[in-house]
Image: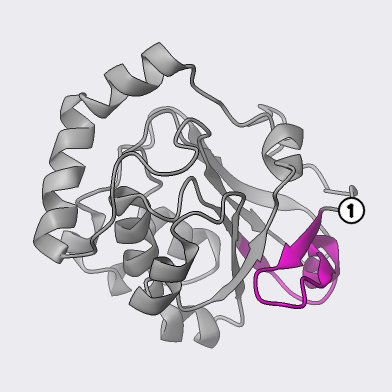
Amino acid sequence: MKSDIIGTTLTQRFEVQTWKAPREPVVLSDLWNEKKVLIKLFRRFGCPLCRLEAAKLSKYKDEFEKLDIKVVGVGFDELGLEEWTEGEYWKFDLFMDPEYSIYKNLELSRYGWVKGILTCLGSQEQRASQLARKEKVGGNMTVGDGFQLGGCLVVEKGGKVTYAFQQEGYADYPLLLEIIESCGGDPSVIDKEDDVISRSCATGSCKL
């Protein structure tokens, strides 16, 4: 993600589309013109690790509503989307970005074949996969575009970015504690076990 994005004001019109027919266009900047927005950029809807993260964030839906935070998810590859929807892993609005426009604009990392496959074998990914199996979120490790990495943004009303996280690996997640705090909430509401899949914020994550 652009290293200088924290503290800047997003002015670009990020146009996405609704995932259900008709595929109506939506401009994300219209959302943060109204209120603070948390944007989760997903990797792959069939990915067990993505489903696990989505479920953990969705667990705190009531907390985000109390904070008056608009939470939205964005994806690019529809493979696995039907099962994702049926499983109700994500309880917030969801949009599609088939052109990868947001991912490219924010300069989110994308793996090549060799690094992508080797990363799947990493210890962090294996631990997260075990936890995903324990949580019974289903999914697979092969179907769809698995090489694009995602991220997370908190954008104040008006477009100022106050929190940004860029994935550096498939099992690389922002701390739920940080997300809630960045949204103006009390991090103590997060159950400790829900941060098991989160990485330390030594790199890739920053906030004001």
* Residue 61 x/y as whole percent: 44, 80
Left or right, 201 with reference to 48: right
Q: Nearer the viewer, residue 173 or 46?
A: 46
Q: Nearer the viewer, residue 169 or 16?
A: 16
Label 1 sits on a secondary structure element that is loop
Q: Would residue 91 be seen by someone viewing this image from the given angle?
A: yes
Magenta-drawn stretch contains 32 = yes
Left or right, 153 with reference to 16: left
* Residue 192 x/y as whole percent: 18, 62
Highlighted magenta segment, given as a residue range? 15-38
Magenta-drawn stretch contains 31 = yes
Taking the spot 81% from the left edge, 77% from the top edge, the residue there is 34
Q: Kindly identify the amino acid type of the residue bearing the numbered disc 1.
A: Arg
How many marks are shown on the rendered structure?
1
Label 1 sits on residue: 13
The quadrant of the rendering that contains the N terminus is top right
Q: Vertically, is 3 above or below 49?
A: above
Left or right, 45 with reference to 139: right
